[in-house]
Image: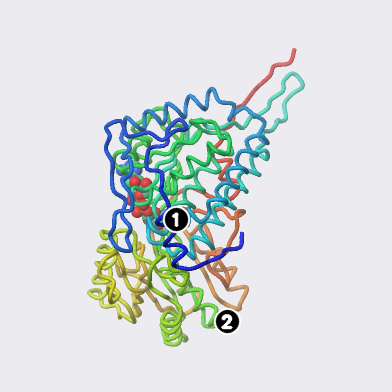
Amino acid sequence: MSADLKTTEYWTALARSLRPDTGLFIDGAFVDAADGRRFETINPADDSVLATVARGGAIDIDRAVASARRAFRTAPWARIAPRARMAVLYRFADLIEAHAEAFAVLDAQDMGKPIAEMLTIDVPGSLACFRFMAEAADKITGMTTATGEDALHYILRQPLGVVGCIVPWNYPLMMAAWKIAPALAAGNAVVLKPAEQSPLSALLLGRLFVEAGGPPGILNVVPGYGEEAGQALARHMDVDKIAFTGSGEVGGLMMVYAGQSNLKHVSTECGGKSPHVIMADVEDLEAAVNTAVAGIYGNQGEVCSAGSRILVERAILGDVVEAFTARTRATVRIGNPLDPATTLGPLVTRSHQKRVLSYIDIGRDEGARLAFGGAVPAGHNSGAWVEPTLFADVGNGMRIAREEIFGPVGAVIGFDGPDEALRIANDTVYGLAAGVWTRDLGKAHRFAAGVECGMVWVNGYMNGDMTQPWGGWKQTGNGRDKCFDAIVAHTQTKSVWVTLG
Ligand code: NAD
């Protein structure tokens, strides 16, 4: 899909004309919450109310799970030829593509992401995921094993049943795609709980799935708060798996809830504090710096894999901070998310803005040097805005180097030599991603082998496609999105031992 970025006027007119779905999507239809409650979803660019949405609670989760279980048992979804399931998922992807502009506007307004990012990253990335998982549907295989001649033993690989998908707000459409596409392709029924900050695109997904020929009940979408709808889903006795993306704190709760309920499978994709390492022997310093700028300010820094710790070899430290500052000034453009020229929108909510600004205070108090930024941008008092910010002279022991800020705040940390780079890179509880820039292949491979995380980029950052297992080590969690493993993780084996007469 090639993106036509169009004009602010075009997107503003489209935003005005959209009438987003705001019910709970259960059993193939939009319904109110059982107790009739609703909540507001706010446009963080100007604090206006974007929509009021049905607020799912425990009773609604019961309804959605019952619908999913019924559909799993009675609709042919799990038992039809996988190519028939594939055909529905391809039609689903085609419908998402046909509604690409609506998805782009919904998420841009719901969480503040620039429309250009929606059109060039989120929408194409989500389509790639649906199509990859659709194509994978008939590639799931069982096996036979070696036995004596008096037996035949084969292993079936079958869907788990009902999968609860709980997703965050930073890539509303794409995180939903990464969770529901493999679950559906493997033949499961799904209950999706979008983040309360960004429920609208998920509801459109629900509607389009049924329009594509998906059986009612196979994909249910229940917006609501984490401690209400989310907890009810994760504790539910009839849910077979929770596929979770979000904070480490809530990821930990998923495991507790599973232990306190029915021992359901749990996959977790949580936070990061990823090191982006620039060695002094880097071949193309300009490319490294430009990539580091994009690696921390893309999506307002609200990215699990953001290169938030920028590790720079001391011999080039001054040059990098200078070039980084110049590149940010030249290319980062704060503004209306519906303006195609905007590269930095508001943060997702006022409370998140407060949290990010408090980390900037912490950085100052800890003695880091503020290279630029650090405030609410001038003229942006309504909405949840924070300037792109860079701290230099950061020690890896400081809280701004240890805790996930999840905003446009980079921390530059100096090092001497590859051993120290690796030691600092690994001195974190997280383990999602790392990048390293060097012309020395030996150094690059040794770093890649030694760094404790799930994804490493050499002379690049955030590159990848659907073949890449996306997920982390350590407290980033145990899940893997994208890749073929993601579909296999939504199946279970069944051993069939046949005694031959
Ligand atoms: P969050 O943990 O606050 O919320 C995530 C989801 O969990 C939301 O739908 C929320 O409603 C729900 N939730 C909250 N409390 C719950 C509870 N008690 N029981 C059940 N559900 C509950 O995270 P967030 O602020 O929405 O997202 C930001 C986090 O997500 C960051 O830490 C980021 O790194 C992480 N993230 C990770 C990846 C990855 O691939 N590793 C990708 C994107 C985001």
Q: Relative to residue 197, is residue 211 depicted above or below?
A: above
Determine the image quadrant of residue 77: top right
Q: Residues within 10 Å of mark 2 (few under 14, many from 20)?
A: few
| Quadrant where the C terminus is found in the figure | top right
Residue beneath disc 1: 171
Determine the secondary structure under disc 2.
Answer: loop
Q: Quadrant of the N terminus?
A: bottom right
Question: In the picture shown, does residue 317 fall above or below 303?
Answer: below
Kindly tell me whether mark 1's CB lies below 8 Å from ligand 1: yes
Q: From the top left corner, tell me how far across and down residue 90 is, in percent.
A: 63, 44
Does the Cβ of the disc 2 residue fall within 8 Å of ligand 1?
no
Residue that protrudes farthest toward the right in the picture: 149
Q: Between 483 and 13, which is closer to the camera in this rendering?
A: 13
Q: Say which residue label 2 marks.
A: 284
Q: Earlier in the sequence, mark 2 or mark 1?
A: 1
* Residue that appears at 29% across and 48% down: 40
SS type, badge 1 = loop
Residue 88, picture quadrant: top right
Q: Position of residue 261 (x, y in %)?
A: 36, 30
Relative to residue 487, is residue 324 depicted above or below? below
- Where residue 345 sits: x, y (%)? 38, 67
Judge by depth and name the residue closer to the eye, 255 or 250.
Answer: 250
Query: Can I make out residue 423 in this image?
Result: no
What amino acid does circle 1 point to? Answer: Tyr
- Closer to us: 358 or 63: 63
Q: Is residue 448 visible?
A: yes
Q: Amino acid at mark 2?
A: Asp
Q: CA distance from mark 2 to mark 1?
A: 31 Å
